[in-house]
Amino acid sequence: MKIGLASDHGGFEMKEEIKGYLKDYEVEDYGTYSTESVDYPDYGKKLAEAVISKEVDFGIAFCGTGIGISISCNKVKGIRAALCFNEYMARKTREHNNANILCIGGRTTGIEIAKAMIDEFLNTDFEGGRHQKRVDKICKMEEE
Ligand code: RB5
């Protein structure tokens, strides 16, 4: 499984730690590459496009709160980026929403919770069934 990572400066340090944590995966880093101030939409877009083009299987995105980069990722058609704060949310967004990007706040979430959320996210399958119909409705909204 190939995982894409992206962050702005607010999520940079957490992205770097997570890169080390994901040593059992193939990882592609879409930046940013330092703590210099940058604009989170640029990095959210890069990661989201990599997920849509299947360059990577899933994305993990970071900014200070996780909010800006999640909003940005969700502007790309086909992306379901979920800002999560605990393992339950990370598991449920795979089971119920078929999320393809996990968003985390580098300044609002502890590193151990971030790692635990990533484990849940990457090891949980979409349940389909009644949830498929709901995800289909989201996709339909993108066509309207
Ligand atoms: C950058 O200062 C900060 O605004 C950004 O990382 C993020 O929190 C935005 O939602």
Image (spheres, rainbow, N blue to C red):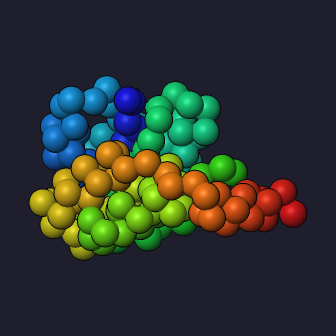
Q: Which picture quadrant has residue 49? A: top right
Left/right placement of residue 138 relative to residue 105 reads right
Q: Is residue 11 above or below residue 27?
A: below
* Residue at image coords 37%, 50%: 124
* Residue at image coords 32%, 46%: 123
Q: Position of residue 23 (x, y in %)?
A: 18, 31
Q: Is residue 56 above or below residue 10?
A: above
Question: Between 25 and 9, which is closer to the camera in this rendering?
Answer: 25
Q: Which picture quadrant has residue 89? A: bottom left
Q: Position of residue 45 (x, y in %)?
A: 56, 48
Quadrant the C terminus occupies: bottom right
* Residue at image coords 54%, 61%: 97
Q: Position of residue 105 (x, y in %)?
A: 31, 66
Q: Residue furthest left?
A: 112
Q: Is residue 98 above or below residue 53?
A: below
* Residue at image coords 49%, 43%: 47
Q: Residue furthest front?
A: 129
Question: Between 66 and 95, which is closer to the camera in this rendering?
Answer: 95
Q: Position of residue 125 (x, y in %)?
A: 43, 48
